[in-house]
Amino acid sequence: MTDQRKSESEWRDKLTPEQYRILREAGTERPFTGDLLNNKDKGTYRCAACGEPLFDSESKYDSGSGWPSFTAPVGGESVAEHTDHSHGMTRTEVRCAKCEGHLGHVFPDGPGPAGLRYCINSASLDFKKGADEPKDDGERP
């Protein structure tokens, strides 16, 4: 469900041409070109369109794919998954649950118990350096 009801004209004004192509037109940046691919800083990766927290640095890893990769989103409702039948294949597309911006895809070849790799375009993300935001799970560290 979106709560970012902007017109395409408003999105064009807000985003860079590359961000618009990826977030609004479901484009893909070339592998190994994204600004956040090699980022090792601690912090939170947010949607470049609406600022929604999506991934934290603790879940980021080097998959060798050429795109920032994560094992899981920050919360169960921060990303939405949709079946993508483009380019002659079936994949699971990942979108920001708040503004419906295209982020990338999730594949079942990742590490960890869930075995997922969230393969995300750098242009879809803004990085906020600093302590990762706590997840509201009702528990305190």
Image (tube, rainbow, N blue to C red):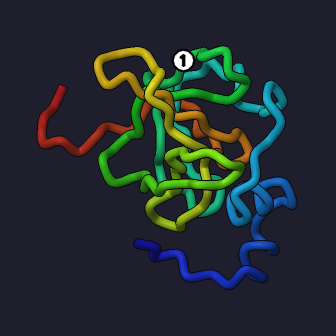
Q: Residue at x 46, y 76 (%)?
A: 3
Q: Which element is circle 1 on? A: strand
Above or below residue 14? Residue 68 is above
- Which corner quadrant of the image does residue 11 belong to? bottom right
Residue 136 in the figure: left or right of residue 17: left
- Which corner quadrant of the image does residue 10 belong to? bottom right
Report whether residue 131 is seen: no
**Circle 1 residue:** 61
Q: Residue at x 69, y 29 (%)?
A: 67
The answer to which of 11 and 82 lies nearer the viewer is 82
Measuring from the top left, give residue 17's x and y in whole percent: 87, 60
Residue type at the position of mark 1: Tyr
Q: Residue at x 79, y 29 (%)?
A: 31
Q: How many marks?
A: 1
Q: Quadrant of the C terminus?
A: top left
Measuring from the top left, give residue 46's x and y in whole percent: 55, 47
Q: Residue at x 73, y 46 (%)?
A: 123
Above or below residue 12? Residue 32 is above
Q: How many neighbours does mark 1 have within 10 angstroms: few (below 14), some (14-19), or many (20 or more)?
A: some
- Which corner quadrant of the image does residue 58 belong to? top left
Q: Quadrant of the N terminus?
A: bottom left
